[in-house]
Structures are given as C-alpha cells and as structure tokens.
Image (spheres, rainbow, N blue to C red):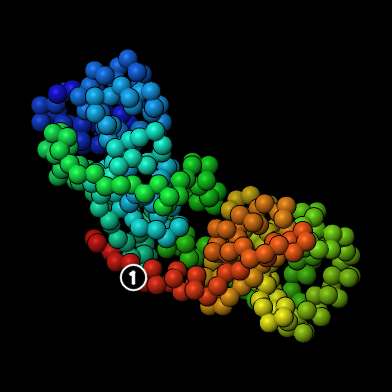
C-alpha cells in the first residue's frame, strides 16, 4: 500500500515510521499536491499540513483524504484550534476527519474529548496543552490504525453550522508566546483599579478627547482640560458613574466606565492610543464583565466597527437601533454560563 503523508515529517511525528513498520510505503510532502500525482496513492493523510487541498484534487483521490485536527470538531475549525478552545471556552479535544471542499467540515471518523482544569493547574501553558493533544492524536490514529487502513469505519456528521472558523490573522497580538500559562493569559493579564479620587486626570482627558474617541461619541467636539477636570470631579462626587483604570504589567492601557441610566448600567471603554489594534479592547471588556455579576448595556456608534466586534466577542447581544447608535445588552445569564462551564472542567492527566 502506498501512502502520501502531507505535513509533518518523520522527525516531527512518529506516525510516518509507524506506518513504515507496518509495511506501508510512505511519501512525505509539505508542498502543494497536484491532480496528476494524487491518484498514485492508496491512502492520503494530512497532519500539520498548512495548505488547502483543491476540490479538483480531492475528486482524483482513490478514497477520502484523512486529516488529523487538534480540536473537538465542529468546534474551532482552521488555525490555532487549541488556543481558541480556551479563549472561546469550547470543548477541547482531537479529531480525525475526512476532508471535503470546505475547511475542517468533512465527516468525523474518530475523536476524543480532552478536559483541562486550568483552575487547579494554573501553571499549565498553551504549549503544554498542545503537546498533550498532539500525543493523544497520534495515539488515536495508532489505536484505530487497522480500521483506517481497511477504510472500515463509521462516520459522524460534522455539523457545519456549529463552531467557528479561525484564521492565522485572528490570533490576538497580545499573545507573546506559547509558554504563557493558560490561566494567566485568560484571567491575570489585566488588573482594574476603581478611581475614587482625582488621579491621572490628564491621561483620562487624552483618552477621551482624542480624534477617534470623539468621532464615535454623541458629542463630537473636543473639550478643554479645564472643562474635563470639572466634569471629572463632579462625576466622582455624584458616584453615578464609576471609572476604572485597566493595567497590563503595571502599565495603564485604557479605561472602562460604568454609568447608570434609567436603572440600567451602561458600559463604555477606551484605550491608550499605543495599545489599540492589539486585541486589548476585547480583553478589557471580556475580563471586566466576567468579574461583575450584573447585566450591562452598551451604546455603540453604527460606524464604530471595532467596538461592535468587541460587543459580539464578549457576549453582548444587539437589542435595537437609536438614530446613529446601536444598543447592546449582556445579561447575567451569560456570566453564569461562563462560570458553570469553567467550574465543570476536569483535568484528565
């Protein structure tokens, strides 16, 4: 039997030598495969292969190509599935599936759920969890080797409407390396300090008064520092609006404000200019609302695409449109669900 192994080489995975020991001729390739060569092989396996296989190539294969994917499909299709399983709080695991014309949507052949408890194992890193899943994926293939070779297995529908597809560019820029603790990244990255006296007034003035902040506000005109200082003191005295400083590694990255309007708490946020475009806005809102067991609303200008995306990523649901502004709501139930899922996680190792 001839096997084409796409992706990792024999130094990166033990599966190639395993196949050869079982008298299977293996050709390893990382580059694109053509329609002409695909029909030469009886079995084609994709593991760590970074290229999409065209539909015209798939049709030339003798049997469906198998892909080894490091997620519990249909969750986390595409790039960096292990990271997104933690970030989006979805099932973690491994899957062997057939490849079809779309990304990671083919029928599921074998899969296994792997549970991690990052609350009990706070030091476990993204790299460590990746290595665990990698070994489990190899074990899953070896365990079912005979059925795979004989093309004798049951298929399960890979529900295309479930789960998200992530691309390489979606990876947050604040993730500096894979050795960081999963718990630290998800929970300890940002710290919040409620402002109870007149501290950092100029910094907050600059954040609220810059061009981008004014562009999407109801009042688009810039304001003087003297005017800001008066508003700032009055706000702190009346206590109808709470202002928090958000910090990363002791550096102030932005502010988040909670204001009561007609018995409803409205949330707003803004970042220091140099920290924008690095996913800190999403992290700032997500971590803040997850620590507060209350219902929040948010008012976002219809052209403020970045803040609309932040709302969508942090559990806010669109309610209605008011002139040029969109009103979002994040209920207590979303927070409760977040906690219950994390508390029920268990570590299998």
- Say which quadrant the C terminus sits in: bottom left
From the viewer's perspective, is 313 left or right of 274? left
Q: Is residue 83 visible?
A: no
Residue name at image x 78 percent, y 61 percent:
323
Secondary structure, mark 1, is helix
Q: Which residue was labeled with disc 1?
A: 344
Q: Which image quarter: residue 92?
A: bottom left
Where does residue 176 sit, x and y in percent of width and height?
50, 49
Residue name at image x 39 percent, y 51 percent:
75
Tell me: residue 244, above or below residue 174: below
Of 177 and 349, nearer the camera is 349
Residue name at image x 36 percent, y 49 percent:
159
How many marks overall? 1
From the viewer's perspective, is 217 left or right of 315? right
Where does residue 33 sit, x and y in percent of width and height?
35, 21
Tell me: residue 262, above or below residue 153: below
Q: Which image quarter: residue 1?
A: top left
Residue name at image x 27 percent, y 56 percent:
113
Residue with the most extreme bottom position: 238
Of 246 and 158, nearer the camera is 158
Tell me: residue 183, above or below residue 42: below
Where does residue 117 sit, x and y in percent of width and height?
33, 65
From the viewer's perspective, is 48 left or right of 216? left
Query: Within 10 Å of the Cα at label 1, are there few (<14), some (14-19), or many (20+) other Cα atoms?
Result: few
Of 216 and 150, nearer the camera is 150
Tell me: residue 316, above or below residue 296: above
Where does residue 53 sit, x and y in percent of width and height?
38, 28
Q: Is residue 287 visible?
A: yes
């Amino acid at each position: 039997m001839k096997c084409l192994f796409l992706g990792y080489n024999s130094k990166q995975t033990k599966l190639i030598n395993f196949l050869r020991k079982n008298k299977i001729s293996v050709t390893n390739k990382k580059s694109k495969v053509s329609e002409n060569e695909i029909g030469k092989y009886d079995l084609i396996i994709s593991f760590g292969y970074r290229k999409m296989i065209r539909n015209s190539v798939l049709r030339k294969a003798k049997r469906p190509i198998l892909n080894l994917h490091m997620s519990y499909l249909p969750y986390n299709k595409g790039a960096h599935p292990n990271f997104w399983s933690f970030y989006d709080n979805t099932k973690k695991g491994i899957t062997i599936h057939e490849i079809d014309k779309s990304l990671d949507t083919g029928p599921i052949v074998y899969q296994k759920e792997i549970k991690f408890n990052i609350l009990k194992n706070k030091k476990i890193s993204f790299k460590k969890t990746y290595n665990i899943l990698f070994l489990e994926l190899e074990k899953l293939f070896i365990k079912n080797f005979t059925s795979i070779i004989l093309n004798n297995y049951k298929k399960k529908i890979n529900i295309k409407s479930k789960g998200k597809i992530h691309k390489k560019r979606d990876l947050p820029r604040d993730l500096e390396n894979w050795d960081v603790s999963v718990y630290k990244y998800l929970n300890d990255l940002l710290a919040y300090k409620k402002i109870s006296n007149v501290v950092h007034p100029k910094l907050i003035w600059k954040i609220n008064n810059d061009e981008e902040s004014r562009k999407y506000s109801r009042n688009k005109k810039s304001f003087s520092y003297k005017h800001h200082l008066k508003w700032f003191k009055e706000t702190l005295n009346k206590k109808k609006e709470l202002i928090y400083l958000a910090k990363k590694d002791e550096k102030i990255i932005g502010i988040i404000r909670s204001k009561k309007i007609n018995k409803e708490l409205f949330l707003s946020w803004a970042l220091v200019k140099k920290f924008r475009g690095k996913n800190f806005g999403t992290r700032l809102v997500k971590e803040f609302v997850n620590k507060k067991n209350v219902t929040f609303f948010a008012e976002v200008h219809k052209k403020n695409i970045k803040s609309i995306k932040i709302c969508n990523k942090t559990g806010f649901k669109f309610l209605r449109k008011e002139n040029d502004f969109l009103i979002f709501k994040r209920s207590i139930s979303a927070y409760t669900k977040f906690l219950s899922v994390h508390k029920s996680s268990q570590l299998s190792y």
